[in-house]
Image: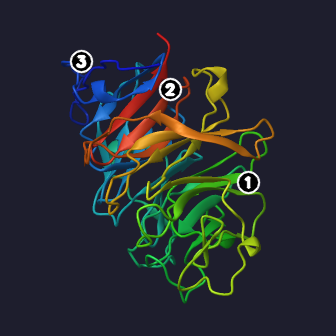
Amino acid sequence: MMRRLLPFLLVLPLAGSGPALPPAAPDANLAKIKLPAGFRISYFAQNVGGARSLALGPDGTVYVGTRGDKVYALPDRNKDGRADELVTIASGLNEPNGVAVRGGALYVGEISRILRYDNIATTLRQKPKPKVVYDQLPTKEHHGWKYISFGPDGKLYVPVGAPCNVCLPEEPIFATINRMNPDGTGLETVAYGVRNTVGFDWSPVDKALWFTDNGRDMLGDDKPACELNRAAAAGLHFGFPYIHQGDLPDPQFGKGKEASTYTPPAQKLGAHVAPLGMKFYTGQMFPAQYRNQVFIPEHGSWNRSSKSGYRITLVTVDASGKKATGYQTFASGWLEGQRSWGRPVALLVMPDGALLVSDDQNDCVYRISYGK
């Protein structure tokens, strides 16, 4: 049975000010969110304009990328599950969607370059000057925003989306996932045929790379399916632009292509749901059946006649960590009829086991917890 809970609205002070104000009145929108029994949702932070990718610093500060021009920090010094303040680290950037933390430095992924802010925990209030790690990525904006993350191998993974709805790009770096050393050297491609991934993570069981991919548009309401993929090895091709959803030839580019030539998705997702910043749940707060399972924020369709997505889904994985066994809704309520008031983007598993969720329509970061 699903139940609705009334969390509290957080009022954030300006950067550098005193403690946060007491919680305000219950929020009517959050009361609409449906979760499994025992789960509750509240605001970790509000007024976070265009909140997108999330990363965690070693001191517990949450860093937030956007598709505008700003990057934010959300400190929670008293560890009460609510950010104390909203700090603007940088502005004037080119769609700094991607954020990642390593060795005390904040890495930020813009359209065509990767920046690094050293000693970010001690400099975040000083408008720190970044160092350019890499600046040779394509400048095309179509699917150009980056999701970045460090893998178990210590390398920074950076995708480059297709510069189109569907096409055969001239430059081989398009429609790929790549990795580089933390200093920007050694760029190499690890996955091909990836139309537009804005979320990936590594299995806690076998360290394989899993990623979401947004399916092409203009083939109707119900095809192709968006995808959750598993890269069992480097160098695999996942089909774009020839084969979609593992078994659907593209009407223009799929002629003469065999679906068996390409790696099929681990799980077909809904058509046009726009799956973004997926995460394996590695915390201890949620019940045991959720551990090592995949949570996916579905940002929602933009041109489907009846909207789809606007929710968080759960893909269950078997004990081997290699096979998806189910796909179901975990959290919903951001879509009312054909009108949305929120769009989930990215997830972050916190040290206490709570799950943070960014929302670039409601300009906030939620906190999903379980139990008392």
- Horizontal relation, residue 134 to residue 6: left or right: right
- Horizontal relation, residue 28 to residue 146: left or right: left
Q: Residues within 10 Å of mark 2 (few under 14, many from 20)?
A: many
Report which quarter residue 351 is drawn in: top right
Q: Amino acid at mark 1?
A: Asp
Q: Residues within 10 Å of mark 1 (few under 14, many from 20)?
A: few
| Dot label at residue 352 | none
Q: At 55% across and 78% down in the image, what residue appears?
A: 174
Q: Is residue 364 above or below residue 302?
A: above
Instruction: Let me know if residue 18 appears in the view.
Output: yes
Please tell me which residue lies in front, 314 or 83: 314
Q: CA distance from mark 1 to mark 3?
A: 42 Å
Q: Residues within 10 Å of mark 3 (few under 14, many from 20)?
A: few
Residue holding disc 2? 354
Say which element carries label 1: loop
Q: Amino acid at mark 3?
A: Pro
Q: Work out whether mark 1 precedes mark 2 in sequence or the reverse, and give the earlier one.
A: 1
Residue holding disc 1? 153
| Dot label at residue 23 | 3
Q: CA distance from mark 2 to mark 3?
A: 19 Å
Say which element carries label 3: loop
